[in-house]
Image (spheres, grey):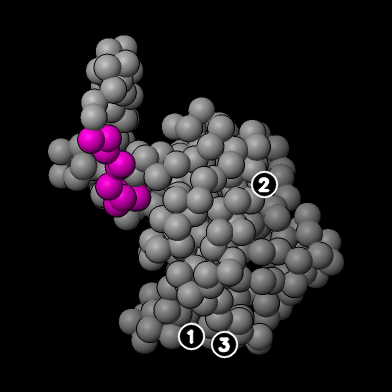
Amino acid sequence: CAAISESLIQSTLFGHVRGAFTGADQNRPGIFEGARGGTVFLDEIGDLPLAVQGNLLRVLQEGEIRRVGDTLARKVDVRIVAATHRDLEKMVEEGSFREDLYFRLRVAKVTLPALRERDSDLVLLADFFALRERGTRIDPEARKAISSYPWPGNIRELESVVRVAATYSDFEVIRTEHLADAGIPIEKPSSSEPDSAAQGPNKDYHQLVEDYRKELVSKALDRHGKNQSAAARDLGMTRQALSYLARKLGLL
């Protein structure tokens, strides 16, 4: 929900009729109509605009929707499962989340502990994400680093970091230096004796990679007016990872 504009959320969830807006050249049902007795999962529901919250409340109370640009109410039969990292009770007090919708949604509440509190899951998830990246593996030292990092961005940050680290490892074995390259504050291992080969072509290669990363992050920040959250979403990483990387690259 967080990464989509209000108008697109309305159209995606509730559908639209022909002529409702520029480019709407045909009638299109939304997710709720398409679910047909199934379950709709709404991620980050705390980011829904108030106008969309009202329409969602109509689904829960009346079991009906109105497509964007239409006056006809259409019956729908769906179950809704919602998730958020926000404190909805506090948002209700602040007026940014509807109280009536909150109580409609809070039929069964499950609080999932932060990833840093689930040590047994942490490495298993990291291995799973790594294997998805062309069978990449994680070496023991990198596993220790993953276990010791607090992961403020939870599972999304872990997935993003592993994906980027796998790329830096050429999809072979993720080591601590690859985690550092992916934005985790880990000191890269240094050799007491310089490797003559590393001072040659490899040095140029790593400098090129560093320059490319700096350009990517810089352009993303410029595109979004230095808004770190928006730039992080653009690059597929958490705000914390982007902030660390930008500071490391001298951009902040």
* Alpha carbon separation for disc pair 2 and 3: 31 Å
* Alpha carbon separation for disc pair 1 and 3: 6 Å
Q: Residue at x 71, y 64 (%)?
A: 40
Residue 228 visible within the image: no
Q: Secondary structure at mark 3?
A: helix
Q: Which residue is mark 3?
A: 103
Tell me which segment is drawn in magenta: 182-192
- Mark 1 and mark 2 lie on one chain; the one further toward the N terminus is 2
- Do tag 1 and tag 3 residues touch (Cβ < 8 Å)? yes
Q: Secondary structure at mark 2?
A: loop
The front one of 107 and 63 is: 107
What is the x, y in percent for residue 83?
57, 70
What is the x, y in percent for residue 222?
23, 35
| Nearest to viewer (mark 2 / mark 3) | 3
* Alpha carbon separation for disc pair 1 and 2: 30 Å
Q: Residue at x 27, y 17 (%)?
A: 196
Q: Residue at x 52, y 77 (%)?
A: 113
Residue 176 visible within the image: yes
- Mark 2 and mark 3 lie on one chain; the one further toward the N terminus is 2
What is the x, y in percent for residue 227?
26, 48
Q: Which residue is mark 1?
A: 99
The front one of 137 and 43 is: 137
Q: Which residue is mark 2?
A: 17
Q: Residues within 10 Å of mark 2 (few under 14, many from 20)?
A: some
The front one of 26 and 129 is: 129
